[in-house]
Image (cartoon, rainbow, N blue to C red):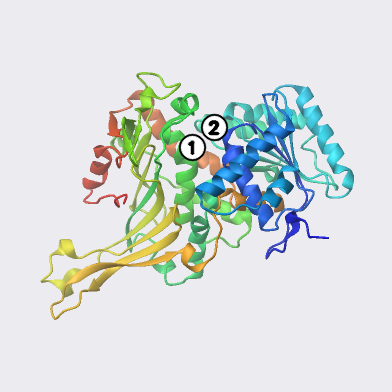
Amino acid sequence: MNQPFFERASKISVAPDCMLVIFGASGDLTRRLLMPALYNLANEGQLKSRFTIVGLGHHERSDDDFRSSLADGLRERAKNAHTDIDEHLVTDLMGRVTYLSGDFDDPDTYARIAGKLAEWSKGGAGMGNAIFYLATAPNYFGDIVERLGSAGLLRESETGWRRIIIEKPFGSDLASAKALNNRILQIADESQIYRIDHFLGKETVQNIMVLRFANFMFEPIWNREHIDHIQITAAETVGVEQRGKFYDDTGALRDMVPNHMFQLLAMMTMEAPNSFDADAIRAEKAKVIEAIRRLSPDEAVKNTVRGQYVGGFIAGQKLEAYRDAPHIEPNSETATYIAMKLWIDNWRWMDVPFYIRTGKAMSLRRTEIVIQFKKAPGVLFRDIDDTKLSSCRMIFHIQPDEGITLRFAAKQPGRKVQLADVNMDFRYADYFKTAPSTGYETLIYDCLVGDATLFQRADNVEAGWAGVQPILDAWNVTKGELHFYPAGSNGPVAADMLLQRDGRHWLPLQ
C-alpha cells in the first residue's frame, strides 16, 4: 500500500492531527494563500492523513463547489509560478475539505461545528485538536471568540488542545487593541491565541536572528556607534482592488505599520534573547517596540508623510486613481502611502534614525531592510572627493527574491587609487532548493506544533499601537498635507525630502 501523501518522509516531525476550521473561508485569503500553504505542507509530508479542513462562510454552497474553487486556485498559483502540481495530492487534500454555511453570530453555527468536531474526534486521544482560523473582518473577532467559548469549543482536555489564529488588523488604535485583548483573554488563555503576521513566515525575516546572533562578526557593530540609519520598505504594486470598504477606514498606517513594519523593526533591533523559547523572543521584541520614541503632535506631523495614488501605469497596465476605485469616497483623505522617521530610545539605538515607508500602487513589489553603516574616516583618501567615499550597507531582501546583499568599497583596477562600490550577494535560490511558498507554511505548522515564537503576544500588539498612537492623535487634530503620487511611481516627492533634509536618501526601488 502506498504511503499517504500526507505522511511522506520529512526532515522535521509531522504535525499532530487537527481539524482546521476557517471562518470566512469563502474569502480571497483562503483560496490565494491558506490552501496553497496547506498543499505545500502536505507535499512536504508534514500533515497527518486525518488532518481535516472545515470552511465556514455566510453563503450557501456545496462541498463540491467549495473544493472545486480551492483546487482551481492551487492550479492557477502553480501555473503563475511556472511549477508543476501533483494532481493526486490535490485530490487527496480536497477529500479532507468540507464546507459549512452559517452566520457568525448564530449559536446553531457553533453547535454544528461542535458536531463536526465530535464526529471527527472519535479516533481517541489527540483527536480533539482544533484550530479556529479567523480569516474574517476584524469586527467579528471578539464575537467569534466569545461564541466559541460559550459553545465549549475552546475547552482543552487530555484528548486535545484548542487554538485560535487571528489575522490582522488587531484593533484600529491603542484603545481598541487593549479592549479586544481584554475581551478575548477573558475567554481564552494567551497560550491559545496566535496573532498572525505572514511577513514573519518569510525565510529572510527568520534569518535575521541567525545572521545577527550566530555570526559574531556582525553583532559587535550592530549599534549606534557603527550604524548611521536603517530603512525599512514595503512597496506593493497592487492598488486597493476590492478591499475599498475596509481600506478606506484603515489606510496605510493602520494596515501596515504597527504589525508588519514594527515586527521587522523588532527583529532587526531586539537584544539577544536568553533562548529560542517563544516567550523569551517575544519579550525582547516587546521591549524594543516599547522603546520607540513617543512623538509630540508637532514632531508627528513633521516626521511623517501621507500620500495617495492617482491614476498611472504599472508594468504597462493602467490603474485608476484610488478615489475612483470601488467603495471609495470620492474625496477620500485616506493615505495609501506612509513614510515616517522614528527613533528607538534605548542604549543600543539612541539617536539612530529609522526611516519606514510603505505604499500601494508603486513601481515595484519589494520588501527590504537597509542597514546603512557609517563612513570610514577619510584621512587615507584625502585626494578623493568625500562624496565618492561610500559607506557600507547591508540589505535584507524579504520579498520577492529572498536574500542578503552586502555593499562595500573596493579599488578599481589600475595604477591610480580609485574606489568603486561592489556587491556580495546571497540568494536563497542559489544555495537552497526551496519550493515557492506563501509565507504561511511556517506559521500554520508552528501553530500546529504549539510554537508561538513568530506570533504576536498581547503586549507586542499593544506596544505596536502605542508607537503609532501619537501619530494618529496628531492626524486627528491636523492631518497635514496629503501628497499625491502617480500609480507606478516610487511614492510622493515629499517622502524623498524627509530624508534629504537629513542629508540622506532612500535606496532606489529598482
Number of other residues with Cα within 10 Å of mark 2, as a class: few under 14, some 14 to 19, many 20 or more: many
- Picture layout, residue 416 above or below residue 281: below
The reply to whether discs 2 and 1 touch (Cβ–Cβ < 8 Å) is: yes
Return the x and y of residue 118 as percentages of the image width and height.
Answer: 85, 37
Nearer to us in this view, 141 or 83: 83
Nearer to us in this view, 438 or 218: 438
Mark 2 vs mark 1: give the one in front: 2
Query: Which residue is at a point 46% across and 66% down the rendered structure image?
Result: 430
First in residue order: circle 2 vs circle 1:
2
Q: Amino acid at mark 2?
A: Gly
Horizontal placement of 509 versus 368: left or right? left
Which residue lies under the disc numbered 2? 171
Return the x and y of residue 35 as percentages of the image width and height.
Answer: 63, 44
Query: Which residue is at a point 29% across and 28% down the rendered structure image?
Result: 480
Which label sits on residue 465? 1
User: How many marks do you count on the picture?
Assistant: 2
Horizontal placement of 167 versus 144: left or right? left
Furthest residue to the left? Answer: 383
Return the x and y of residue 27 as percentages of the image width and height.
Answer: 60, 32
- Picture layout, residue 433 above or below residue 163: below
Return the x and y of residue 498 as percentages of the image width and height.
Answer: 26, 42
Of helix, strand and loop, which one carries label 1?
A: helix
| Residue 446 visible in the shown view | no
Q: Amino acid at mark 1?
A: Trp
| Residue 259 visible in the shown view | yes
Tell me which corner region of the image, top left, top right, bottom left or bottom right, holds residue 408: bottom left
Nearer to us in this view, 306 or 416: 416
Number of other residues with Cα within 10 Å of mark 1, as a class: few under 14, some 14 to 19, many 20 or more: many
Of helix, strand and loop, which one carries label 2?
A: loop
Tell me which corner region of the image, top left, top right, bottom left or bottom right, holds residue 180: top right
Horizontal placement of 469 versus 190: left or right? left
Horizontal placement of 105 versus 76: left or right? right
